[in-house]
Image (tube, helix red, strand yellow):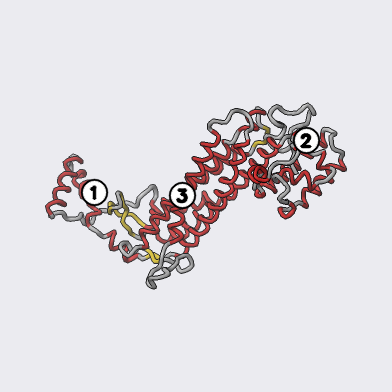
Amino acid sequence: MTLWSGRVEGKLAQEVWDFLRADDTELLPYDIEGTRLHARRLGAAGILTAEEVATAEAGLSAITIADITEDDEDCHSAIERILGDVGKKIHAGRSRNDQVATAFRLYVVAACRAAQEAVRELALVILDRAEPEAATPMPGYTHLQRAQPVTVGHHLHAWVEMLERDLQRFAFAQGQAAVTPLGAGALAGSTLGLPPAEGVESMRNSLDAVADRDFAVDYLYACAACHGHLSRIGEELILWATSEFAFIKLGHTSATGSSMMPQKLNPDVAELARGKAGTALGRLVGLLALVKGLPLTYNRDLQDDKPGVFAARKDLRGTVAALAVMIHGMELQRDRMAAAAADPLLLATDAAEALVEAGTPFRQAHEIVASAVRDGSYVAPVGRARPAPGPGGAAEAIRAARARLTS
């Protein structure tokens, strides 16, 4: 069933029908919700009777994905067909343009909420591992070279800081999506004088309401940034699991083996988390390219805005869940970390700062210590107190992060 067949004589070629048909069943529950809001608008305006509104709401509650057939162009036309007689009246005062934009916004709001819940759970898993390791020594790195001593708790807390910023990005995207284009119609509203939808903020301009996909861009940006962080975490887990680092042993609930080499235990979860970051970035760039040249208002190009968003929601959910299992199950090799952190060269900056405290200008102190390292006469400072990194140290930072995430 199509909503526009009255204008077209005959039947579309099968190739054209297959090309135009949208696989948007993921939108169904959100389109049902948008249609419910619209039915109430029609009831308030007297277009539908109270009995018809009740019939529509009951019918909407009963619709499932199984009700959609290959003869339906999309879930929007399917809803109208399934509702029967009241469905023939329910499209009054709206277009597929504001209908799909409404459903898509509701979908993105839900996707943002789900992302925040999943990312928050991952952050709490990391904090569970960080808290008992607040004072466990390990080396910190720059350029993947040992740099200065830190603690395992401090390092893991850095992962949580990244994820907390992701929570803020998803919250922003949710806010951008949480307005409704209902009432914009095809692009210029309706003469029926329908009231605004109750309980939601309406968009200010009907043209923008139909054409805007910035909320989807914001969501894909949040996904891409989050996947970037998950990729960095994954890369560190991969390094730590190597024989060269040997900072962790992989848990058997999240590692894989080799089909040929019986000794192998592979960090495939972390590798795939790293790989999916590129795909997430591609989806963002793809949507930006899709919308960059579209004149106002609706163009059929926008049918392609949804598959990437659907896939992004699935990928983020899967990546976060699998990494949580991996991090929960990894076994820290504290002796190996402590031995690496005991490298006397990690205290070279401390040696230079000791000279600074004795009155030597820092640049000169830097040169003195560098020269000693170069000629082999360097001796690490002894008995010099090194404060825990960060305000209050790792333990306090971890407690504060947990309080924020559980408040």
**Picture mark count:** 3
**Residue at mark 1:** 349
Which of label 3 and label 1 is nearer to you? 3
Q: Residue shown at 53%/50% (left/top)?
A: 405
Location of residue 72 in the rendering, given as x and y in whole percent from the top left corner = 72, 47
> Gap in Å between the C-alphas at discs 3 and 1?
35 Å
Q: Amino acid at mark 2?
A: Gly
> Gap in Å between the C-alphas at discs 2 and 1?
78 Å
Residue 9 relative to residue 382: left or right: right
The residue at the far bottom in this view is 262
Location of residue 369 in the rendering, given as x and y in whole percent from the top left corner = 17, 48
Numbered badge on residue 277: 3
256 shown above or below 397: below
Mark positioned earlier in the residue sequence (2 or 1): 2
Determine whether label 2 and label 3 are within 8 Å by CB. Answer: no
Q: Quadrant of the N terminus?
A: top right
Mark positioned earlier in the residue sequence (3 or 1): 3
Question: Which quarter of the figure has residue 187?
Answer: top right
Location of residue 257 in the rendering, given as x and y in whole percent from the top left corner = 43, 68
User: Can I make out residue 164 in this image?
Assistant: no
Who is closer to the viewer here, 379 or 195?
A: 195
Determine whether label 3 and label 1 are within 8 Å by CB. Answer: no
Crowd class of label 1 (few under 14; some 14 to 19; many from 20; radius 10 Å): some
Numbered badge on residue 6: 2
